[in-house]
Image (cartoon, helix red, strand yellow):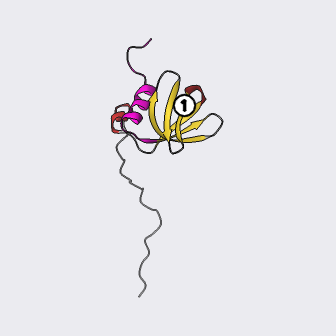
Amino acid sequence: MQNQASIQDDFLQSLMTEETLASVYLVNGIRLSGRVQSFDQYVVILDSASGRQMVFKHAISTVVMSRAPHSFERHAEPKPAAEASTAPPSSAPAPTPES
């Protein structure tokens, strides 16, 4: 077993610690929304308006958060610097004002 935490564990831990609202999409297409209250190797406990739900991880397709938690940013890929938009000059002649 690994000594270091996995990206999955870090992701879920940051959702839980910062109480970030998340949408959990299941493999059958159902969307569940709420806050991660707890998780382990097999399940995620999601607290939503309708109550607490235990969701088996093998049934989860995607987890989408409402915003990127600050503690998870260390796993984010560095974004390239914005390139200056230098469009080539147009070959069409500039319009001239008529007298």
The quadrant in which residue 9 appears is top left
* Residue 57 vertical position relative to residue 83 in the rendered view, above or below: above
Q: Quadrant of the N terminus?
A: top left
Q: Is residue 18 above or below residue 10?
A: below
Q: Quadrant of residue 16?
A: top left
Q: Position of residue 45 (x, y in %)?
A: 49, 31
Percent across and percent down for residue 58 are 59, 26
Q: Is residue 32 above or below residue 60?
A: below
Taking depth in this image into account, of 82 and 45 the one nearest to the observer is: 45
Amino acid type, callout 1: Met
Q: Nearer the viewer, residue 22 or 37?
A: 37
Q: Identify the residue under disc 1.
A: 54
Can see residue 76? no
Q: Is residue 4 above or below residue 59?
A: above
The quadrant the C terminus occupies is bottom left
User: Around disc 1, counting alpha carbons within 10 Å, would you say few (fewer than 14), some (14 to 19), or many (20 or more)?
Assistant: some
Q: Whole-percent x and y of residue 79?
A: 37, 39
Quarter occupied by residue 50: top right
Q: Which residues are magenta?
A: 1-21
13 and 64: which is toward the camera = 13
